[in-house]
Amino acid sequence: MMRPLTHGLPGALATLLHGVPISHGMVDFAWTVAVGAAVHRVTSVRLEQRVLIVEVPDQNWDREITRSKPVILARLQTLLGRDAVAEIQIRKHPR
């Protein structure tokens, strides 16, 4: 049975990233893969002590990301490793 390429992509990326030290660039890349380009464009992320801090521009994006947290966290853990990200916190962009 053939499966779409997108089914194997997270596993292939996880294999490529395995053993590479986690950097801001790696976290940003994993975030883009996990959430897509549209969400990536309006957010910024940083990893602090296994907590991914996601800065959003407004309450609408806060709500959307909050709703999707379990899926996003699972994708990030697949890409970066199970122990890399334990939690996602959402904050508004400082103005």
Image (cartoon, rainbow, N blue to C red):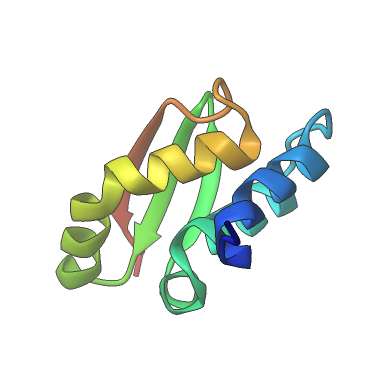
Give left or right: position of 12 versus 65. Answer: right
Question: Looking at the image, how many numbered discs can be counted on the residues?
Answer: 0
Instruction: Please say if 95 is above or below 62.
Output: below
Q: Position of residue 53 (x, y in %)?
A: 43, 44
Q: Which quarter of the rendered picture does the N terminus lie within? A: bottom right
Name the residue at 83% across, 34% down.
Answer: 20
Where residue 45 appears, as percent x and y from the top left, is 51, 53
Q: Quadrant of the C terminus?
A: bottom left
Above or below — where is 66 with respect to 87? below
Q: What residue is at 29 percent from the left and 40 percent from the top?
A: 70
- Image point (57%, 60%), residue name: 3
* Quadrant assignment, res 55: bottom left
Looking at the image, residue 34 sits to the left or right of residue 87; the answer is right
Q: Where in the figure is residue 83, as x and y percent of width and height?
A: 56, 20
62 displayed left or right of 14 = left
Q: Is residue 6 depicted above or below 84 in this figure?
A: below
The x, y position of residue 29, in whole percent, is 66, 58
Farthest residue to the top: give it. Answer: 83
Residue located at (78% from left, 33% from top): 18
